[in-house]
Image: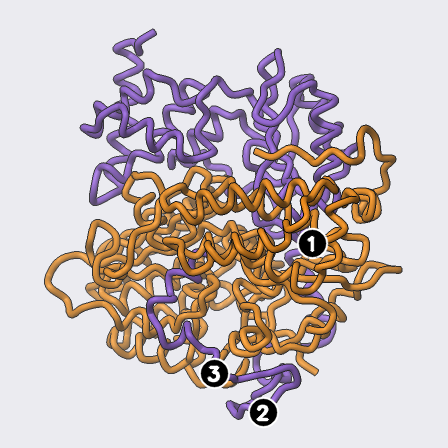
Chain colours: A orange, B purple
Amino acid sequence: MTTLTPILTSRWDTDRSWTLASYQAHGGYSALRKGLAQQPADVLEAVKTSGLRGRGGAGFPTGMKWSFLPAPDGGPRYLVVNADESEPGTCKDIPLMMADPHVLIEGVILTSWAIGCHHAFIYLRGEVVHVYRRLLAAVEEARAAGYLGENILGSGFDLEITVHAGAGAYICGEETALLDSLEGKRGQPRLKPPFPAVAGLYSRPTVVNNVESIASVPSIVEHGADWFSSMGTEKSTGFGIFSLSGHVTRPGQYEAPLGITLRELIDMAGGIREGHELKFWTPGGSSTPIFTAEHLDVPLDFESVAANGSMLGTRALQIFDETTSVVRAVSRWTDFYAHESCGKCTPCREGTYWLRAVMHRLEAGQGDPGDIDLLVDLCDNILGRAFCALGDGATSPVTSAIQYFREEFEAGMHTPASVLFPPERSAVFDYVPTGDATTVAGVH
Amino acid sequence: MAYTAETIETLAADAAQIVSRYPDPNSALLPMLHLVQSHDGFVSPDGIEFCAKTLGLATSEVSAVATFYTQYKRRPNGEYTVGVCTNTLCAIMGGDEIFRSLSERLGVGHDETTEDGKITLERVECNAACDYAPVMMINWEFFDNQTPESAAATVEKLRRGEPVAPTRGPASVGTFKETSRVLAGFYDGRAGEGVSAGPASLRGLELAREKGWTADGGGTQPAASGGESAPQPGGEHSSVDRPAEDPKTDGKGEAK
């Protein structure tokens, strides 16, 4: 049996956990003193050796990403923290920053020290204003305590942090779109190469890392790479926050070694809601192909989830029981991708538009013969042909849902989803449905 | 129509402070658009001109940015934006019914404002609080675990001009203009209000405490305790490891 390993979540229940005083009372900023006493290369090496892989979805080795920066040329190099958490189902970075902003700041300072950055940015999505307050306050507290600014703790190292609020655009979670947005532009992805490591923010060498990745750095510096890699699996080392939402008894954040299974997590969360059973779930957000009950024992690590046809993504486990229409679920995710497509490339812009149209008529029970083939064909023309992963992500729920629940798509040619699966049965509160049950809810 | 000299002076002082946070002044544009909203209640033509002049951009360039992001409003916004999450998870847990009932109660649809100018109703996308579904956001503060009744009660308070308190956030929700000013980076001193974390955020931690599970030796590891890689049912360390080896896939996954 796998057990939970609270590390990043361990201080969330302490009194006024977001304050410097609370963070320091629980060991905060001791890793910083340790790291600043080492050479930057040693900090980088520790992160590399730990095997930490990006916690924002891709799973790229963090230390390797840092080492891709070209040799110093005397000009600036930047660290940009991706705090644009918006992948449907993903809800780990926001509570982390709300409860414990200083662990992120300590991670930013250590990372900046390791890569030679003197001005770091935290790009926070704009729709979480209280998290922004907590980050702004934490940066001020850290500065007043001498952890930021000039000659940090007498090390000679200087660092400023700017916390930047976005303005509502899922695409800005894509790292190059994020950089364009941070430069004051429309958030649209850039062609790669060059990668941000070579030409990132202001065309300077830049590291872009997810919040949870950076927040994991202090514990690695504090306890060592071996401690970190003793958890998890051989290639997916360490711990991560698993976010359970939907039809489970106790939804919430469960921090565990990578490789834990959904069966174990659901057990910890008190099971599927009473009287119901698991139907389908996402392992890592809506952009990762759905799984079913047959995948309950797949170890939730990068390799095992991929070997089973999906992606670990952000460990955003959205759980749906047998009352849920998969067609309705996929139709709504498709609305999301069509709404959030930035419009820069044709396959994604036009493809998501047509996916939405077809999904809407299937949800309304007005699908045409051949619509399933049409969906598959559309997905085939988006996947791998778009500028960035948004287009790929849009196809994941569609193709995987057809794979596992084809009969529900076929039913969409004659029966509305709301008749097959009355929505009031899926809701967590009781209500008496009103109005025309066959109406497809409007979209943006 | 145009800003008064006094307004321009005030905005210019704030803009200068925003610009000073960045190595490149153009990075100030997003916060400056929030600043304009804090003054005008939306991104006004005057505000666009002000941003353009301040940063040496064409007004068309500023408009191109302002129209890209959903938090920037092209029409005067209500005092409170009431956003109901209707992305899949929240929608299915009841968000659709909450939106429907609020829409009926207020007599407005998505992105429309009540006649008294109090409330702009919106469907919002996933706001990273799925463990609290269904979720409602008011001026981007969290109202967790909503029902049609709780949402209606909160909205009625807003209509009566009474303060409302989010589940996780400050003691009361600020107005659209006040919130926009915070988003422009002008801290309002309210970080100390509210909880550290809601109950769902603490579920795993509480269970671990109850069971005595810790990260230091106590935790039994799956698959590969101590670094060995034992085979797992369901397919394990297979050849599929592209992210670890191919930098080209890197940004793709970061796109989430």
* Amino acid, disc 1: Pro
- Measured as percent of width and height from the top left, residue A405 is found at 72, 60
Whether residue A42 can be seen here: yes
How many other residues sit within 10 Å of disc 2, few (<14), some (14-19) or many (≥20)? some
CB under 8 Å between discs 1 and 2 = no
**Residue type, label 2:** Ala
Query: In 3D space, how far apart are the residues under numbered discs 3 and 2 (Cα atoms)?
Result: 16 Å
**Chain for disc number 1:** B
SS category of the residue bearing label 2? loop
Is A244 above or below relative to A179? below
Which residue does the numbered mark 1 point to in the structure image?
B199
The chain letter for the residue carrying disc 3 is B
Q: Earlier in the sequence, mark 3 or mark 2?
A: 2
Distance of label 1 from label 3 (alpha carbons):
40 Å
Q: Residues within 10 Å of mark 3 (few under 14, many from 20)?
A: few
In the picture of the structure, the residue carrying the numbered disc 3 is B239
Find residue B28 and report its horizontal and vertical position in percent.
Answer: 28, 36
Between B17 and A22, the one lying in front of the other is B17
Judge from the rendering whether residue A182 lies leftward or rightward of residue B100; answer left or right.
Answer: left
Q: Which mark is residue A329?
A: none
Q: Earlier in the sequence, mark 1 or mark 3?
A: 1
Q: Residue drawn at (27%, 43%), measured in percent from left and top?
A: A183
Q: Nearer the viewer, mark 1 or mark 2?
A: 2
Q: Nearer the viewer, residue A86 or A420?
A: A420
The residue depicted at 51 percent of the width and 21 percent of the height is B77
Quadrant of residue A167 within the rendered picture: top left
- Say what amino acid the circle numbered 3 marks: Ser
- Left or right of B216, for residue A266: right
Which residue is labeled 2 in the image?
B230
Q: A276 or B114: nearer the eye?
A: A276
Which one is closest to the eye, mark 1 or mark 3?
3
Picture quarter with the N terminus of chain A: bottom right
